[in-house]
Image: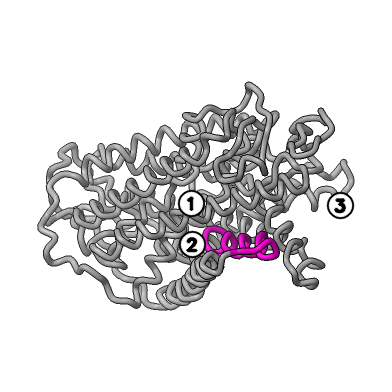
Amino acid sequence: MADGKEPENGGVELGTPNAVPSTGTMSTRRLRSEDYNDYSSTDVTPEGSPPGGMNGFAHPESYQRFGETNGTTWYQTLIHLLKGNIGTGLLGLPLAVKNAGILLGPLSLLVMGVVAVHCMGILVKCAHHFCYRFQKQFVDYGGAVMYGLESTPSAWLRRHAIWGRHVVGLFLIITQLGFCCVYFVFLADNLKQVVSTANGTTNDCSLNRTVIMTPTMDSRLYMLSLLPFVVLLTFIQNLKVLSIFSLLANVAMLVSLIVIYQYIARDIPDASDLPLAAAWKTYPLFFGTAVFAFEGIGVVLPLENKMKNPRQFPVILYVGMTIVTVLYISLSVLGYLRFGENIQASITLNLPNCWLYQAVKLLFSFGIFFTYAVQFYVPAEIVIPPLVARVSERWGLLVNLLLRVALVSVTCVLAILIPRLDIVISLVGSISSSALALIFPPLLEIATYYTEGMHPLVIAKDVVISLFGFVGFAVGTYAALVELAAPVPAVVNATSAVVQ
């Protein structure tokens, strides 16, 4: 997800040496933990022996792997891909369409989806290239960038190639902790609304009326109230236990989305007064939210590596991302059409004040709460182990837990400082997601293949995509900060927003 993804092992031993590589063929040697420590995916990391087959992004003579029976099927891979790209960013897309316009918004989402898939393909292709060159069974995102810098004609970049891995790791940390900040704000906003309208909640979901909201504590106090429970949740470090919570979270969010869809697809009012294109000053906010939603590039390499038959992965990638794009466009357009100018930062906040939809808010919040631990696992595994290694074994567990408390507290404090869900999503998307999804992949392709000869049109295409990502990064961040400095708009009552 961009949200709702979880790792499955995180740097455990993947196998043992098995064979000596032969000319023109990939070695069947498995990477041990010191060779591979992939945290680029919050959904999946390779487990057991990498599967076999040829990936369609690479030339047959340049990439080959030998599979085993414990890899994932095409269906399992598709489910993981969907889960890795669908999260809280989806619920903010109706507001994003409002910031772009009822025509410009969907068209921009379509373009964003096409570019995002293309960048995923670039990353996979470059990773395959380095797998073959260095006789490695798997290369993660950071490793691909590092090897790409080592392939450039610039001596300075080659000497500092290790910083490519560090920069990718930094942006992964920022992205994942940013997701965690979004979760705090989402939970607080939805819980506050449920509590404040509890006295007026009815059994009639078709009753359009304004509910007088009962005064309740500030949403930032809800965040502080949630902090101890989130801290205790992140103390769970066993991935098998986390996978159970992740399954519950996915079921809860799936049921919630089905109920939301059936509501917004009914009784859509006249949309003739909605602007086809919104003011340009709000478009950067759309960009940040959209790239936040599409930032699932970290899942593609681990997913492809785990398949029984990687030949199927290109088709799965295109089919999966087509489903994701259709889902994004349909929910965003229907949500904006249904609620118009009253659309809020999360579409759940616009649902009517009846027990069914209050339950939907709580159900989705339940899913997001447990997803926090899954998202938190990635930055925790990057930051904590090196620091724990510096202390004696006697103090290792205590330092580990204290660092977890500190990291969770940082995300809570940042959420309190920026308690606006739409702004947090746009900031995270503009600052980090744009770099991982749009800026790095095309530059990586140039670094990887420039010395081997590239067509000028390919270079121009990569430069345009990277510049697009960089402009979005700069303008989106600026617009989000400007919006943050502006006075907080009045909060629209959830039920009154439904009145059309």
Q: Name above or below for residue 70 compared with residue 269.
A: above
Q: Residue at x 36, y 76 (%)?
A: 487
Q: Residue at x 56, y 54 (%)?
A: 122
Circle 1 sits on which residue?
2
Residue type at tag 3: Arg
Residue 320, given in percent of the width and then of the height, sits at 43, 41
The magenta-colored residue range is 435-454
Q: In the image, which disc is placed on residue 429?
A: 2
Residue type at tag 1: Ala
Image quarter of residue 138: top right
Say whether marks 2 and 1 touch (CB < 8 Å).
yes
Query: Alpha-carbon distance for marks 2 and 1?
Result: 9 Å
Circle 3 sits on which residue?
390
Q: Which of the two discs, 3 and 1, sits closer to the camera?
A: 1
Query: Alpha-carbon distance for marks 3 and 2?
Result: 34 Å
Callout 3 crowding tier (Cα within 10 Å): few <14, some 14–19, many ≥20 = few
